[in-house]
């Protein structure tokens, strides 16, 4: 009987731990080493490491060190620019950000300020566009931002550098002040583009003149701004930079121009228009109207007539044509009857054209015919300041002062003094106003009615237009003095002239010296001025603020003797000598016989040197003779 062999013995099975399960502490088994307890214990980490072959140990340590360094470098990152990084051809690879910014500023900074050459493109491409123009980048608010540019550059980590990572071309960052850039581009667009011109009709010498419509081009500012921003500091963009445009076509066509000529322009110039006012009629010719008349296109391209009423109202030709219906207001003319103020001639109401209504009045007449081209003129009445009814209200009730200066008759004196008095007579000075001799009389020229006479220039007598007018200036100064109102500007002659009260006289010089006073009397002042062949008188009418004004003249002091010199000017006038001196005049104000206040006026006269001329004949001899008689010719200085 056979027997089956016994099954092979199985080794004892040890349960496996999951890899994540932490090692458990082995129970201590008493016994000697190598005993049964040691056979069941697993080797420790140091025991397993010590059991490894030596080459494996060394390789592992090196790998661990390199890996750790790379891991740390990948977290820390790099600080220098990647090799091979360029900005507009400038290599900044391997540099720190600060050094990269500095290099870009050195290399690209000057180019950033150079003008950008541009052309305005043709809208349809058929033409070449404008000629080359230049855009100033600084004026246009363009500037490079090198810090932001460097920020764009790649800065690889240590791992990237170990792996050979490189940079590339970086576009420069550009900042733009858009408002400034748009302004510069718009100006260049106007220079390089072509302006759209709508059809229009103007009028010259009473005839219509047609302006034909023309298409135009306008710079596309938004598109141009994009192009300039991209091209700035970008060497890859060709120069000149071509800027885009938009085409503008006129709305007015030939048919509209023909209609405007037929329906308005030709009828407008066919005959004068008539304006009436105050029973008077005036005719305004087409030549005058046409200077201020145009037909312009509206938003739909329709030609619409436009009349500039304000410009027409100020046109000397129009004023001349309408002077029959336009008149300036005229103040009442006053005088004295004994001590009483009387009205010699009453005021006249004025009429002036209303420029705001002139356009609406005239335009409808231009397409009419015959008597239908007539209308009532748009006028406004203007009131005079002084009338017979408001004398008391203005306070012009009595004579305030009056002064007369006598002179030896001479043709130039009679003419010039008379003309100045004529221009001054009737001046009305309201309370607080300042009256000016030069503004009232005007420049002493032949056109203003003055002739050549003796003046003082460079401290000696010479001839020029306006000689003798200082007699009127002196008379005015004394009228102001004794009326008690306030002198604002005046000046005495450089040397004393015997006919005038010393320290209380005045001269004038156009553009240099005026004779002005302020009416501080509290009421209006009316000035009467008249002259004869030997005298000039100025009288102030108003209300006296003081009962009496006295003049007190002090002694001459600081007397200086004159010298003798030879005249060299072609218009030299001989003059006799007279000492120079200082003098003080006091103005004393009184009310009820009592002094109210006192003012002092100090004058310094230079010596009047004796002047000897080579030729003292003619008018010069006459002036010298008058001076020798103590009647030296007065003059402007």
Image: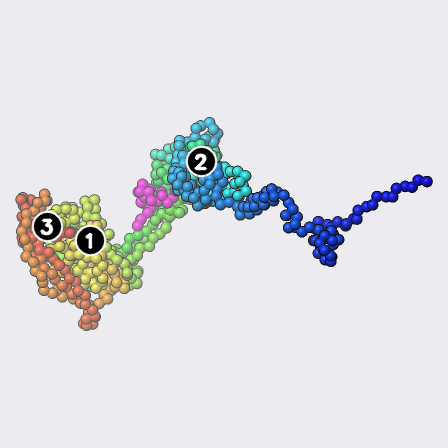
Q: Which residue is located at x 11 percent, y 61 percent? A: 582
Q: CA distance from mark 3 to mark 1?
A: 18 Å
Location of mark 2 (residue): 89
Q: Residue furthest right?
A: 1
Residue 31 in sight from this viewpoint: yes
* Residue 306 belongs to magenta span: yes
Nearer to me, 144 or 556: 144
Q: Which residue is located at x 46 percent, y 41 percent? A: 94
* Mark linked to residue 610: none
Residue 258 at x, y percent in the picture: 45, 31
Query: Which quarter of the figure is the N terminus placed in?
Result: top right
Helix, strand or loop under label 3: strand
Left or right of 550, for residue 133: right
Left or right of 450, for residue 49: right
Q: CA distance from mark 2 to mark 3?
A: 80 Å
Q: Which residue is located at x 45 percent, y 44 percent? A: 96
Q: Quick one: label 1 or label 2, which is nearer the N terminus? A: 2
Mark 2 is surrounded, within 10 Å at the Cα level, by few (under 14), some (14 to 19) or many (20 or more) other residues, namely few
Nearer to me, 352 or 67: 67
Mark 3 is surrounded, within 10 Å at the Cα level, by few (under 14), some (14 to 19) or many (20 or more) other residues, namely many
Residue 539 at x, y percent in the picture: 19, 59
Left or right of 128, for residue 387: left
Residue 137 at x, y percent in the picture: 40, 40
Location of mark 1 (residue): 513
Q: Which residue is located at x 10 percent, y 44 percent? A: 569
Q: Which residues are magenta?
A: 305-328
Helix, strand or loop under label 1: loop
* Mark linked to residue 460: 3
């Amino acid at each position: 009987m056979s027997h089956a062999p016994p099954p092979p013995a199985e080794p004892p099975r040890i349960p496996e731990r999951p890899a994540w399960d932490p090692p458990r502490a082995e129970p201590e088994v008493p016994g000697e080493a190598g005993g049964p307890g040691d056979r069941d214990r697993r080797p420790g980490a140091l025991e397993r490491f010590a059991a490894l072959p030596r080459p494996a140990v060394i390789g592992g340590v090196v790998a661990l060190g390199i890996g750790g360094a790379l891991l740390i470098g990948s977290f820390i990152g790099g600080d220098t620019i990647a090799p091979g990084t360029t900005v507009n051809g400038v290599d900044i690879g391997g540099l720190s950000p600060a050094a990269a910014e500095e290099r870009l500023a050195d290399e690209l900074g000057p180019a950033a300020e150079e003008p950008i050459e541009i052309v305005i493109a043709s809208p349809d491409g058929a033409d070449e566009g404008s000629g080359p123009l230049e855009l100033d980048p600084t004026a246009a608010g363009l500037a490079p931002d090198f810090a932001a540019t460097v920020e764009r550059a790649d800065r690889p980590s240590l791992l990237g550098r170990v792996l050979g990572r490189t940079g590339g071309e970086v576009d420069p960052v550009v900042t733009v002040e858009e408002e400034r850039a748009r302004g510069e581009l718009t100006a260049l667009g106007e220079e390089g583009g072509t302006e759209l011109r709508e059809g229009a009709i103007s009028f010259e010498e009473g005839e219509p003149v047609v302006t034909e419509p023309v298409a135009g081009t306008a710079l596309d500012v938004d598109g141009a701004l994009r192009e300039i921003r991209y091209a700035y500091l970008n060497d890859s963009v060709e120069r000149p930079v071509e800027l885009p445009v938009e085409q503008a076509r006129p709305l007015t066509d030939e048919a509209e121009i023909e209609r405007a000529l037929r329906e308005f322009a030709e009828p407008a110039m066919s005959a004068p228009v008539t304006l009436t006012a105050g029973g008077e009629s005036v005719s305004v010719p087409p030549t005058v109207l046409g200077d201020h008349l145009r037909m312009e296109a509206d938003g739909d391209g329709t030609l619409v007539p436009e009349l500039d009423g304000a410009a027409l109202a100020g046109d000397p030709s129009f004023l001349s044509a309408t002077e029959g219906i336009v008149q300036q207001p005229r103040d009442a003319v006053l005088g004295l009857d004994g001590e009483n103020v009387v009205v010699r001639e009453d005021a006249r109401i004025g009429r002036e054209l209303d420029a705001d209504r002139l356009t609406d009045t005239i335009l409808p007449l231009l397409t009419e015919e015959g008597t239908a081209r007539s209308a009532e003129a748009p006028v406004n009445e203007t009131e005079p300041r002084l009338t017979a009814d408001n004398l008391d209200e203005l306070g012009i009730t009595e004579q305030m002062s009056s002064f007369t200066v006598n002179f030896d008759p001479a043709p130039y004196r009679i003419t010039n003094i008379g003309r100045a008095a004529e221009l001054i007579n009737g001046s009305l000075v309201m309370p607080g106003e300042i009256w000016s001799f030069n503004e009232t009389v005007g420049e002493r020229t032949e056109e203003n009615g003055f002739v050549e006479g003796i003046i003082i220039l460079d401290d000696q007598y010479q001839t020029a237009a306006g000689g003798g007018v200082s007699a009127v200036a002196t008379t005015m100064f004394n009228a102001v003095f004794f009326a008690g109102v306030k002198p604002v500007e005046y000046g005495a002659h450089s040397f004393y002239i015997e006919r005038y009260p010393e320290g209380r006289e005045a001269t004038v010089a156009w553009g240099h010296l005026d004779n002005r006073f302020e009416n501080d009397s509290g009421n209006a002042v009316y000035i009467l001025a008249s002259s004869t062949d030997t005298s000039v008188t100025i009288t102030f009418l108003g209300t006296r603020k003081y009962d009496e004004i006295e003049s007190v003249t002090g002694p001459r002091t600081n007397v200086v003797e004159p010298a003798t010199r030879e005249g060299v000017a072609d218009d030299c006038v001989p003059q006799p000598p007279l000492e120079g001196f200082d003098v003080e005049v006091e103005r004393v104000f009184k009310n009820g016989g009592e002094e109210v206040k006192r003012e002092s006026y100090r004058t310094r006269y230079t010596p009047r040197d004796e002047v000897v001329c080579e030729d003292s004949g003619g008018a010069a001899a006459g002036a010298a003779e008058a001076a020798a008689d103590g009647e030296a010719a007065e003059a402007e200085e």
